Amino acid sequence: MSKQIKTIIISTILFTLTPFTAVASDISVLTYAQLAWLIPFILALLSIPYLVWANHQLKKSTIELKHTEQRFKSTIEGSGDTLWDWNIQSGEIVRINDKYGMNSAKPGNIIPNQHRIHPQDLLIVEKLMKQHFAEKTPFFEASYRIKDELGQYHWVLDRGKIIEKDTNLNPLRMTGTVRDIGHFKSTEERLNLFAKCVESLTDAIAIYDKDYNLVDLNPSYLKLFGGQREHYINKPFNLPGYDNKFVTQVKSQLSQTEHWQEELKLRNAADVLLPIEITIDEIKNNHGQISNYVVVYSDLTERKKAESQLHNLSNRDRTTGLPNRNLFFTNLQKLSQQGTHHALLVFDLDNFKKINDSLGHQLGDTLLAKLAMRLNKLARQQDTFYRLGGDEFALVISGTNDIHTITRTAKQFLAAIATPFKIANHELVITSSVGIVLCPEDGKSPESLLKNADTAMYHAKQKGNHYLFFNDSMNEQAVKRLQIENLMRYGLKEDHFVVYYQPKMNIKTGELVGMEALVRFITPKKGVISPGVFIPIAEETGQIIEIGEVVLDKACQDVKRWIDKGLFNGRVAVNLSAKQFSLPDLTTRIDIILQKNQLPSYFLELEITEGTVMDDPKEAISIMRSLSARGIHLAMDDFGTGYSSLAYLKQFPLNTLKVDKAFIDDMGNERGKNMVDSIVTIAHNLDLHVVAEGVENEVQLSILEELNCQTVQGYYYSKPLSSSEFEQFLKQHIPSDKPNLQLVQ
């Protein structure tokens, strides 16, 4: 009690008793009745201080109660929970901190606000409430989704307990709390998702505590290693098949790097040794302390199979099953780095393209596969046979540079290749050429070895079905060949190919009846490069097609100019290479050049070699007929030097037959003269005009005139002349009685 209140009470008592102090000394004269009347009055006066004090205490308690209530509300609001008090009989429900509008209930409902509970959760909530009402559970607890006033569902945890019952033990009142557990549910869903992921992973996963004792594992672990879960729990970490020393090393490395990964061999449930990649990672708590280790076991069996298949696809040839060019370079590089002696044999098949073109690529692939099987058997166990691509193969003979061993192998290969193959009712005979290099004598890198072997093979091809060892002179020739290729490429670009003309003369009258256009390659620095040098290379590289079109275009241009000047009225003969003749649009190309130069087609004669038309006689006949239909004359060049067939010769729409210079040179003896006589006779019997080329002296001219040859060309009359020189030649050979020459029929 405060000092102020005490002072008030004492003052009040003294004030009240003052009237009686005067008679205090004489109190005995008062009667009992008078005292009885004074006592209540005195007691009332005495209760006033108490009432003042009690009122003060009441106010103080009220204030404290309000403060307590405020703190309680603040606590409730701070907790985020909703408190509820449910009168079960009346349905009245009181809620504090109600965030979901859950302030409604109806009498008789087993649960309040059931219209707001998600339909999928309602049954389980009712079931749990009934269990509590039946005293099967000490309290009611349920998590469910409830809809707020905006129609949004929230996950809540609702907990309550019956706190009052009637005399019949029926529940009258129930209180509880509702807590928003949306974030817990999100976390729970994530954890469930992660747990399902771990359980469904095909990789085996084991979780160990900080002391490397196993605390949990996924189903894939049991599937991989077998056994029951209980067999592994609380067992220390180990690696079956590896000793404790190795396991200690793993733990030591893991303590330094926090991560360990390596491929090991472990036995599975079926006791099969499998390649397994093991990954171990540390798991730390919020304080940075190691709490667990996660070990992942990845079975690499399928991946190894896929890698093996991929390796085969990238390093094996599909057709033959042999190692391919990629593996060739890889293995040869390794072999070269060892510093040991070995030999490389490179070969391809002669005229394999003809088999592919005539019988189809499928049969060609079958031939290559059979060839690979045949040759692979001949190779030593330590040697490797490769297919480099197309019809090109290579054999690496390792550990030796013995010439006897190498040549014996080369001969065996050539003999095996030349042995006939029987495929699809066809008996196929093929030949090959082999180039051989020695390592390290002929090169140290795979690239240089292969280049030099190709060079040796190129020279072996010139002999046919032969093998050759590489030497420096071959390399020099290969370098020169490459230089010629580059010169031709540059020459086509810079117009270094020019056309010379050699006259064709009537053997009886000596008059000019035509000429042959001959290509000359004149370079600024190297001078004139012989046709015998550059034409074979151009034919191999395909440059002969562009060169041939240049010659045809320039020849047509010159002839048109001479015709317009009245200097010439014959035909110009232009050579057609085998590659040009095989072009699918040959006639179109020729038409374009003739139209460009406005030259009528009957002023043009195309010379085709015997070998060109005999490669595919039926196709040749079709092409020749197309050209002949345009009025272009056709001549067969080098007749008798190839493998002509008289049966086809009479079908060719030819106009002229040319006798090769080799036969003209051989006319000095009777046999040679008879050969030319036979050719001329055949030509006349086929109603063909005959031209003898390479005539150099009067004796040859006389014999040809005797044999009834009509036209000759050669040095006897003129060497090949440049365009300007030939124009002067034309001016000198115009007959005085004829303004123009006549076309040779």
Image (tube, rainbow, N blue to C red):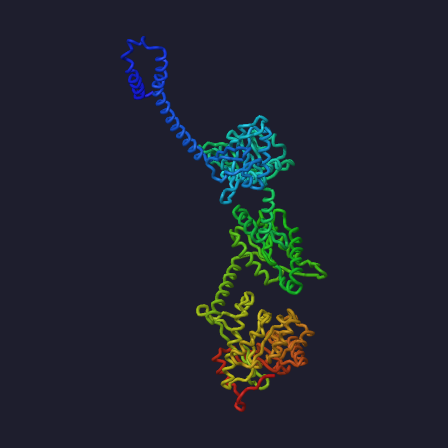
Percent across and percent down for residue 154 are: 51, 41
Residue at x 64%, y 35% (from the top left corner): 269
> Which residue occupies the extreme bottom position in the image?
737
Quarter of the image that includes the C terminus: bottom right
Whether 492 is drawn above or below 73: the answer is below
How many numbered dots are placed on residues in this image?
0
Percent across and percent down for residue 523 are: 46, 70
In the image shown, does 270 or 227 lie closer to the viewer? 227
Percent across and percent down for residue 635 are: 61, 77
In the image shown, does 308 or 710 lie closer to the viewer? 308
Quarter of the image holding residue 433?
Answer: bottom right
> Which residue occupies the extreme top position in the image?
28
Percent across and percent down for residue 730 are: 51, 84
- Residue 267 appearing in the image: no
Whether 581 is drawn above or below 381: the answer is below
* In the image: residue 465, left or right of residue 102: right
* In the image: residue 677, left or right of residue 36: right
